[in-house]
Image (cartoon, rainbow, N blue to C red):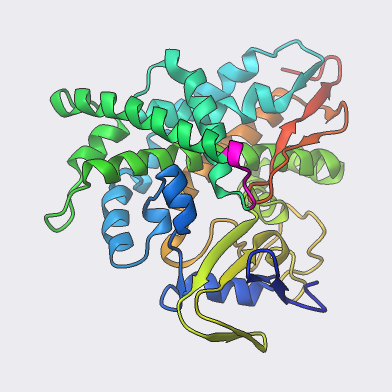
Amino acid sequence: MRQQDPVHRMRLLDGWALTRYKDCDAVLRDHARFSNAIPSEVREQTGLISMLHQDQPEHTRLRALVSQAFTPRAIEKLRFRVEQTAEQLLDAVAGQRCFDLIAALAYPLPITIIADLMGVPPKDMDRFKDWSNDLALSVEPFLPEDAMERVGGAAEELTEYFEAIIAVRRREPRDDLISVLLAAEEEGSKLTHDELIKTLILLLVAGNETTRNLIGNGMLALLSNPDQLQRLWDNPDLLNSAVKELLRYDPPVQLDGRVVRQDVEIGGKHIRAGQLVISLIGAANRDPAVFEQPDVLDIGRKGTSHLSFGRGIHYCLGASLAELEGRIAFKTILQRFRSLRLASEPKRRQQISLRGVEELWVEVAAGSDR
């Protein structure tokens, strides 16, 4: 489709799908002509709206406030906790010849870190996981009514949960994300109570889903390309470029939609104001006009960056945290196991916008774990 019809007309969504890197990159950067406002039907049914779904100037104000909790220094402070958590999670499967890497590490690592960051008690972790899973459905197109009800229910329950914690933090601030956001101020402006709730919900879902799928998709890609897995074992200094390549090769987020503010032309196609334009991130990341041998996994790849974290004003706020968690997860796995292979056919998650692995059973050769 990228070659024959790169700006493809979609009938079901009254919009257009973009498959070329240059088109996706341009649209994601152009907030003046392309709006990120959440569709009204989603807002009405779930009550979900955050800075992710807002345009300037409101987006600028919110991001300036929230970004105070995601400075390079703040992210670096999490390194030890991420390393410790990854080690503890893999300790639980030590000695097992076969285990599900998603259940063992990819799933619990990011949800544990984001919950810790928010100061959520360990006893509530399972509820956090369930809420995150249900809320992740909100980004899916063609969502059936029962799924939309699950999203709304999870948003309601999580709102009540956060309201209780916020009330405590107002009286007794702690060294956690919620306290930082309560205190954050930019040019005399602070987050309203409603903005704080929606921001926490966004950070929970985004902080969990992106890293979970990065680790799952990334390990599947490495196990499916044993030469690259061996290369990483032999050259751990390639870890940084490997994480970026894995994000390009099989991105956690596949779609990024915008609403056209005014009539525009993309790739020779006339697109009307009000229509939807969807950037197909997976396709853009494999555009041969940009990436040499795009379908080949090359953990030492250099050059143009991927679009997996977006572009422009909506570039993923937690990208540095996701990359940190990914690097530590892959490093810990490679240090623990000198021989890994797929034990069965991986089970993919049945979603469109978010691409991930539901189950990834791996087999450890006898004597290869440390």
Give the side of residue 201 with respect to residue 217, left or right. Answer: left
Q: Is residue 227 magenta?
A: no
The residue located at (70%, 12%) in the rendering is: 94
Tell me if residue 143 is in the magenta stretch. Answer: yes
Q: Image quarter for residue 158?
A: top left
- 32 shown above or below 46: below
59 to 203, vertically: above or below: below
Q: Residue furthest left?
A: 188
Looking at the rendering, in which quadrant would you find the N terminus?
Answer: bottom right
Residue at 27% over, 43% down:
194
x and y percentages locating residue 19 in the rendered image:
70, 70
The single residue placed furthest to the front in the displayed view is 145
Image quarter where the C terminus lies is top right
Asked if residue 13 can be seen in this view, the reply is yes
Q: In this orientation, which residue lies closer to the viewer: 177 or 11? A: 11
In the depicted structure, whether residue 269 falls above or below residue 170: below
Magenta residues, as a range? 142-147
Residue 28, percent from left and from top: 52, 69
Q: Which quadrant would residue 294 be assigned to in this image?
A: bottom right
Would residue 263 appear left or right of 214 to someone viewing this image? left
Res. 80 in view = no
Whole-percent x, y for residue 59 in the image: 33, 60
Residue in front for this viewpoint, 353 or 250: 353
Question: Which of 128/140 is in front?
Answer: 140
Viewer-proximal residue among 294 and 213: 213
Residue shown at 47% from the left, 37% from the top: 152
Above or below 342: residue 14: below
Q: Residue 65: percent from the left, percent from the top?
A: 26, 51
At a point 42% along the width and 57% down the height, the residue shown is 53
